[in-house]
Amino acid sequence: MLVKIYGSAIHGVAAQTITIEVNVDTGGVGYHLVGLPDNAIKESSYRISAALRNVGYKIPGKKITINMAPADLRKEGAAYDLSIAIGILAASDQILAEHIQDYIIMGELSLDGSLQPIKGVLPIAIQAREEGFKGIILPMQNTREAAIVDSLEVYGAENIKEVIDFFNEGKPIKRVVLDTRKEFQEKINDFPFDFSEVKGQETAKRAMEVAAAGGHNIILIGPPGSGKTMLAKRVPGILPPLTLKEALETTKIHSVAGKIGTETSLMTVRPFRSPHHTISDVALVGGGSYPQPGEISLAHNGVLFLDEMPEFKRTVLEVMRQPLEDREVTISRARFTVNYPASFMLIASMNPSPSGFFPDDPGNTSSVYEMQRYMNKLSGPLLDRIDIHIEVQKVEFEQLAEKRKGEKSSDIRDRVMKARSIQNERYNDLNISYNAQIGPKEIEAFCSLDETSLHLIKMAMEKLNLSARAYDRILKVARTAADLEGSEQILSHHISEAIQYRSLDREFWNI
């Protein structure tokens, strides 16, 4: 008897329905699995055999042929255990298969028949709804994630016996229903860190506000213990809240990577990723034999924080240049190409020198050569993609001992959201979301300067020895400072503020 059962394969951050054809006949004995399965799927026969025996069923001693179509698409992982097992039982008449084609069935089997969670459930559920399936049957741990998708029945099982009884005897299994919008709104302001906890560093806080308002990449330069990491961790709390569309995009990526917790359904806050400086190229941008999203994709719609940036391997930093421009990563293999979104805000930090002090600090023990070698770890093209360079000074004792709380993240966020709404209106007809994305044409159109501002920026270019690439960056940041103030025109004090944020372009650093 031939039975068709449906599963799903992940390709990038999208899913493709897989038809699993199971044929059982009496013309011999054997177990044949075809359709480009990987080793994990080939080993499924052992898991399935033990699981079925432990719940009172068995793989029949007949010729079993299983085809996973489309046959030219590689299938990976143990997530097909449940679908193959149910297909074998249905094809050998051990259970009824009347409504089996109405559902996508996925799950990894343990030897005792219990079900283990799988990756990529959200894109699988979205694809199931688009193709008109009635429902999806999954391990219980994955149900909250799948239940984000409305108009799709989501059932969760702890054991394969529950799935067998559902088809064979009509016994109900637990259906999970979520009010996605309600859950999203309840947790949208759930942040573990607040800017009110940061003592002093008012200049750095202001730079963070400007960076968040314009979507600008930023690098913090300061001695150890000055609060660079503390500041960076609080940036997601001042960025505009995720929209429901952005939340779904972000959750899909984390789902494919297996980073969604069992108690989590929809990601409601912007991600904050902080990889260690020993990370490899592939782990940062994504890839591998079976491509997976990297840290820059996991930071999509959020923040990527590179602590002690010069300690990262130069090759790792250089592969990030293109994604910073294109806001997506393309991973090509001989048989296929995968695209992962990577629209993130980069926050980097570094010490001013190998010794940890600024060049003119009395405690600086680094030689000119050592400092030059340290600074050369960051290439010009990479720094060209970072709009704001801000020096973070050591916090004095009086500031640390002060009892007064600083400004709350929620107050800063309100100003950021007002500035973003101005930018959304300005770039409504363009494929641009915020000031950091504008190019030369938009700079000319939206960043016109009066005579005073032109004179000021000219003097800055000459006296501070600013590089040519700093010019556009200054105008972009000044545009954001003006938006935060609600000013349609860029004024001289906006230009002055933006010039302060180009530390690494100054002669002081060009040793």
Image (tube, helix red, strand yellow):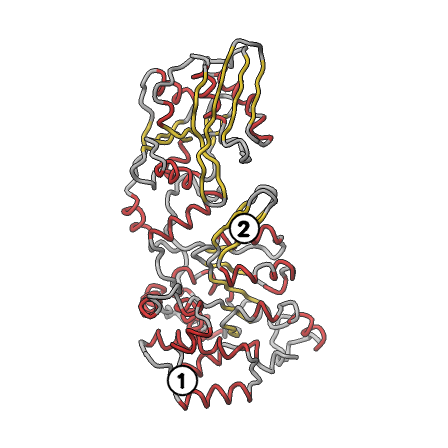
Q: Residue at label 2?
A: 294
Q: Secondary structure at mark 2?
A: loop
* Numbered circle sitting on residue 82: none
Left of 445 or right of it: where is 472? right
Residue 485 x, y percent position in the rendering:
33, 77
Instruction: Report the label total.
Output: 2
The amino acid type, in three-letter code, at marker 1 is Leu
Q: Is residue 468 above or below residue 151?
A: below
Q: Measuring 31% from the left and 18% from the top, which residue is drawn there? A: 170
Residue 127 x, y percent position in the rendering:
39, 39
Which image quadrant: the C terminus?
bottom right
Q: Is residue 19 visible?
A: yes
Residue 189 x, y percent position in the rendering:
33, 55
The amino acid type, in three-letter code, at marker 2 is Gly
Of badges 2 and 1, nearer the viewer stands 1
Q: Is residue 395 above or below residue 133?
A: below
Of residue 406 and residue 45, the one placed in the foreground of this image is 45
Left of 369 or right of it: where is 357? left
Of residue 505 and residue 7, the one placed in the foreground of this image is 7
Residue 484 x, y percent position in the rendering:
35, 74
Q: Residue at label 1?
A: 449
Of residue 10 and residue 228, the one placed in the foreground of this image is 10
